[in-house]
């Protein structure tokens, strides 16, 4: 999170895209990457984490990558009394699903266009 604070979300996403290139990408999100103010419902809360907005913007910044799979772990409903963590996790899962769905649709369109030739 210190890098995000210093360099900003866009620069972090740019650097990640450059490192990933066109290789298949698997994203694993441990919800305790978020600051406890944004995700208190985890077994190992860590102060100084990302905001939920920062996480979502980084994920959106990776939408051009070849995302093949993802998971989101460490959500602990027993500690999530106001469902703050569940909301943040569901938004992150939605972004991941959206990225993969759009990629599948684009691949299908490209294949159909190729088959139509």
Image (cartoon, rainbow, N blue to C red):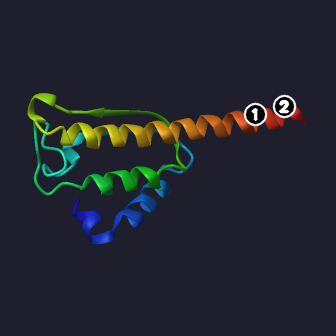
* Residue 33 percent coordinates (x, y): 22, 47
> Could you tell me which residue is drawn at 13 percent across and 49 percent down?
36
**Is residue 4 rendered to the left or right of residue 80?**
right
Q: Name the residue carrying label 2.
A: 115
Taking depth in this image into account, of 22 and 91 the one nearest to the observer is 91
- Residue 102 vs 53, above or below: the answer is above
CB under 8 Å between discs 2 and 1: yes
Mark 2 → mark 1, Cα distance in angstroms: 6 Å
- Residue 111 is marked as 1
The quarter holding residue 106 reads top right
Taking depth in this image into account, of 90 and 100 the one nearest to the observer is 90
* Residue 98 percent coordinates (x, y): 49, 40
> Could you tell me which residue is drawn at 34 percent across and 68 percent down?
8
User: How many residues crowd mark 2 within 10 Å: few (<14), some (14–19), many (20+)?
Assistant: few
**Is residue 52 rendered to the left or right of residue 84?**
right
User: How many residues crowd mark 1 within 10 Å: few (<14), some (14–19), many (20+)?
Assistant: few
* Residue 92 percent coordinates (x, y): 35, 42
Position of the N terminus by quadrant = bottom left
């Amino acid at each position: 999170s210190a890098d995000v604070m210093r360099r900003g979300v866009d620069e972090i996403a740019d650097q990640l895209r450059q490192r990933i290139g066109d290789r298949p990408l698997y994203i694993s999100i441990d919800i305790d990457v978020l600051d406890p103010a944004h995700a208190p419902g985890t077994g190992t809360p860590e102060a100084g984490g990302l905001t939920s907005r920062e996480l979502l913007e980084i994920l959106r910044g990776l939408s051009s990558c070849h995302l093949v799979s993802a998971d989101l772990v460490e959500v602990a409903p027993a500690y999530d009394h106001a469902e703050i963590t569940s909301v943040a996790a569901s938004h992150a899962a939605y972004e991941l699903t959206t990225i993969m769905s759009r990629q599948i649709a684009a691949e299908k369109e490209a294949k159909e266009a190729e088959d139509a030739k």
